[in-house]
Amino acid sequence: MIDFTKLIFAGLSLGSVYALIALGFVMVYKATGILNFAQGGLLMLGAYLAQYFINGLGTTFWIALPMAMLATGLVAAGLQRTIFDKLLTHPAFTVIMATWAVLIVLEQVPITLFGYDFLNMNDPFGLAMVSIASVQVFTIDLWTLAFAAGSVAVLAVFFFRTRMGLAMRATASDPEAAIAQGIEPRLVHATAWFVAGMLACLAGVMLGGGSRLVSPELSHVALRAIPAVILGGLSSPLGAVVGGILIGIAEVLTAAWAPTLAPWLGKNLHLVMPYFLLVGFLMFRPQGLFGQRQSGRV
Amino acid sequence: MSALLQVRDVGISFGGVRALDQVSFDVEEASLFAVIGPNGAGKTTLFNCLTAAYRPDRGTIDFKGGSLLGVRRRDLAGMGIARTFQNLGLFDKLDAAENVLLGRHSAMQCGFLGAALQFPAVRREEANNRGKVAEIVDLLGLDPYLGTPSAMLLYGIRKLIELGRALAMEPDLLLLDEPVAGLNREETARMAEIIRIIRRRFKTTILLVEHDMGFLMSLADRVLVLEYGCPIALGRPEDVQKDPKVIAAYLGTEVPA
C-alpha cells in the first residue's frame, strides 16, 4: 500500500509538470489557434538558463528561477512578434511546421552554449526526502506540486480577475468582436506566448532539478505532454491539468508494473504509454475529456 | 455646429461592381439615423466602411471633425464608436455581465498586479465598472440570465446582451447592424422600446442599418434609402415612405436597367 501511495505521488508530481506544459499549449492554442511544437525548445532553454544563472552567475535558485522564467517568457513573446505574428493569416499547417522548425533551432541553442554534457541544476532540493504519513517522498516532488498548484491559481486570477485575462477569453471566443471592443489582438497573442514560455521554463526547471539532470533530452518531455493536451481537450485549461496528471500517473504506474506484469513488452513501455493514450483518445474521443466537439464555421 | 458624423461622396467598387456610389449624409448629435434598402443595396458595405473594415475608394468620412479613413478597427472603441454585428458577435462562453463588462475594455486600466493586490484605485475603478455593468444589465432586463454562458440563451436575449456591451462603452456613436434581424414580432417591439429608452436616457447618437421598414418608421429621425449602392432618398421617415422611388425599390414595380 505504501508502495502504491508512493507511486501515485510520483505520478502526481510528474503529471503536474505535464500539466504546466499542457497549459502552455492550451494558452497559445486558444489565443492564436496554433499547436506550438516549439514549447519543448522553450522548456529546454528555460532549464539551461536557470542552470546557467545558478552555476554560471552564482545566484541562488530562488532568484534564478524567476529570472529564467522571465527570460524564457520574453523569448517566447519575441518569437511571436517576429515570426508567428507574420504567419497569422497562413494555413494552420504552415504555422505548425514553422513552430516545428523553431523547435529544432531552439534545441540547438543550449547545446551550442553548454555542450552535450548532462548538467547538475544545483537546486536546493537535490535528493532530499521528506516523510508524509510514513511515506518517503522526494522534496522536489512536493515543490513541483506546489508550484503547479500555485501556477494554476495565478492563472485563474489572471483569467477571471484581470482586464487582460478577460480580453484573452474574449479573443479566443470571437476575435472580430474583440477587436470591436478595442482589444489589441497582437498584445493578446504575445501575452499568451509569454505565459506559455514562463510555464515551459518552470516545468523545465522542475524536470531538470532534484534527482534529475539538465540535458538535451528535456525537450522530448514536452512532446509527452501533447497526449495530455489531447486527453484534456486542446481548448480547455482544466482539461490540460487533468490530462497532464492522468498521463503522469499512467506513465509512473506503467513503469512500475509493466516489467513484472508484461515483461515481454520491454522495459520502456512507460515512455510510449502516453502515446497509446493519445491514439486511443484521437480514435474514440477526439475532442478530449473537456473539449468541445469541433464545429467549423464555413 | 457640424454634424457628429459626416459622410461625403463615398464610393467603393469590388472588381468593377460599384457597391456604393456618391453616398453623402450627416448624422446629427443625439439623433437616430437609419440606412435602409433591399438586399444587396449596399447597406452592409456602408456599415463596413463606417467600422473601418473597408476603406472607400472615393469620398470622406469624418467623425467629431477628424477623418475615419485609415483608422484601425481596434481604435474605434477608444474614439467612442461602438458597434453590434449582423450575425451577432457575442463571446459565447462568457455570461451577460462579462460580455457587457468587455464593452468597458477601452476604459479599464486594471493590470495584473493591481487585481492581485487590490490597490484602492483599482477597487474604485472596479466598483465603477461594476456599477455601470449593473445599470445596463438592469436596464435591459438581463438579471435572470446572469451566470449562464451566452451561447445557451435565446437569440433575442443574446441580441440584447450585444446591445448592452456596446452601451457599456458609453459611445458617442452607436452603430447597429440589423438589430432586429432574426427576431420575432414581440422581440422586435421590445428592441424598439429599448432603443427609445436608450435615447431618452443616454442621448446616444445612433446609426442603424436595417431592412425592416416598419421597425424604423417610428424610431428614426432621418432615413437614407439605398438601392444598388446609390442613395435614392434621404429625409424624414414619413416623407421617404411616400417617395415613389422608394416604393418601387421595395415593391419591385420597376425593372432596373
Image: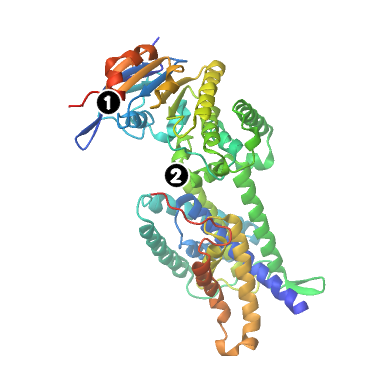
Disc 2 residue type (three-letter): Arg
Q: Secondary structure at mark 2?
A: helix
Residue A186's label in the rendered image is 2
Q: Position of residue A170 (x, y in %)?
A: 52, 43
Q: Quadrant of the N terminus of chain B?
A: top left
10 Å crowding of disc 2: few (<14), some (14-19), many (20+): some
Between the C-alphas of marks 1 and 2, the distance is 47 Å
Q: Nearer the viewer, residue A78 or B51?
A: B51
> At x 38% / y 62%, what residue is drawn?
A97
10 Å crowding of disc 1: few (<14), some (14-19), many (20+): few
* Residue B129 sits in quarter: top right
**Circle nearer the viewer, 1 or 2:** 1
Q: Quadrant of the C terminus of chain B?
A: top left
> At x 60% / y 41%, what residue is drawn?
A162
Q: Nearer the viewer, residue A239 or B66?
A: A239
Q: Nearer the viewer, residue A51 or B36?
A: B36
Residue B4's label in the rendered image is none
Disc 1 residue type (three-letter): Gly
Measured along the vertical axis of the image, is residue A269 above or below residue A11?
A: below
> At x 54% / y 60%, what residue is drawn?
A233
* Discs 1, 2 touching: Cβ within 8 Å: no
**Is residue B175 at least partly visible in the picture?**
yes
Please give left or right for residue B164 compared with residue A152 in the image. left
Q: Position of residue B30 (x, y in %)?
A: 47, 15
Measured along the vertical axis of the image, is residue A180 above or below residue B240?
A: below
Measured along the vertical axis of the image, is residue A27 above or below residue B65?
A: below
Q: Position of residue A279 (x, y in %)?
A: 50, 71
Identify residue for label 1. Answer: B252
